[in-house]
Image (tube, helix red, strand yellow):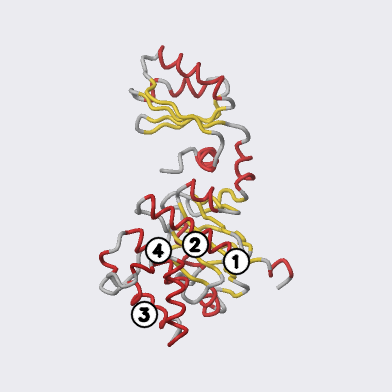
Amino acid sequence: MNKKDNQLAIQVQDLHKNYGEVYAVQGVSFDVRTGEIFSLLGPNGAGKTTTISMVSCLLAPTRGDVRVMGHSVKDDPMAVKAAIGVVPQEIALYEDLSARENLTFWGKMVGLRGGALKQRVDEVLDIIGLGERQKGRVGKFSGGMKRRLNIGIALLHKPQVLILDEPTVGIDPQSRRNILDSVKDLNQQSTTVLYTTHYMEEAQELSNHVAIMDHGKIIAHGTHEELVKIVGEMDRITLTINAESAKVIERWQAAEGVQQVTAEDGTVELLVDDSNLVLPHLFETATHAGVRITSVDIQEPNLETVFLHLTGRALRD
């Protein structure tokens, strides 16, 4: 490897995965620098999980390759597995065992024994904040506690790269906050993180670099600042109305300063040059069409604005 490659923890090179005529991942390429948090951001079904399943040797690529810490997933999968810790989207725990028993079991699976195993289990319980609940049966844990234990299992062998697939789905806000803080703490301790999410605010808060995925492809990538520049200074206006959007959407699309309009279920999203100039016209047009605007939300450009601009639909879809 050259000097530049030594600074890369993950190199994804023209990655493809298809199942017959179904193309789950199509030509995905990106680099993750050593010591950074890199997020794959996209809606459900975008290809994020398939991509990281190939990165973590759970799926074989149809075409292309991935190198993790210099090792190819095709040529040296055992070295890749030794370098990574994987937190799957589905919780993988023995619910009849305690937190400590789960960690001890998985610690033995990665080759830890005796005093070294006990010490590492103690360290991981402290990292994930479950020391006081270590003897509790996992089946009685909350969803957030199970997620944290899942992360702990991935940390047992002190991986250089931590891969997390949608780790905050379906948990309460406090647990979500704990997990996000834990990810940042681990990163500050030199752990490289590859993180997938469909929550724009998570990618925005955590990431040094973000790749936006849709339909199996990366449609944009860069820092938050670089991605937001794609839409320039446009504002995003979200309106709810009390009638069918068809009554006003064509008129709003034609209004000066409106760049893009999408509508679904009584909610209309607009990308506009200047919300202060456009809003009065939107209200005037709605009044003439007999439509009432029931709520207005205005946001400066963010990653969801970028996704809306590139795909014509909101990230939540």
First in residue order: circle 4 vs circle 1: 4
Q: Callout 2: helix, strand or loop?
A: helix
Residue 75 rendering spot, x and y as whole percentages: 57, 78
First in residue order: circle 3 vs circle 4: 3
CA distance for labels 4 and 1: 19 Å
First in residue order: circle 4 vs circle 2: 2
CA distance for labels 1 and 3: 26 Å
Amino acid type, callout 1: Ser
Residue assigned mark 1: 190
User: Which dot, 4 or 2, sits closer to the camera?
Assistant: 4
Amino acid type, callout 2: Thr
Amino acid type, callout 4: Arg
CA distance for labels 4 and 2: 23 Å
Mark 4 Cα shell of 10 Å, populated few (<14), some (14-19), many (≥20) = many
CA distance for labels 3 and 2: 28 Å
Quarter the C terminus occupies: top left
CA distance for labels 3 and 4: 16 Å
Q: Which residue is nearer to you in this view: 242 or 144?
A: 144
First in residue order: circle 1 vs circle 3: 3
For the point 38% across and 69% down, the residue is 131
First in residue order: circle 3 vs circle 2: 2
Amino acid type, callout 3: Phe
Residue 115 rendering spot, x and y as whole percentages: 45, 86
Residue 188 rendering spot, x and y as whole percentages: 58, 62
For the point 54% across and 74% down, the residue is 83
User: Which dot, 3 or 2, sits closer to the camera?
Assistant: 3
Residue assigned mark 3: 105
For the point 58% across and 64% down, the residue is 12
Residue assigned mark 2: 51
Residue assigned mark 4: 148
First in residue order: circle 2 vs circle 1: 2
User: Which dot, 2 or 1, sits closer to the camera?
Assistant: 1
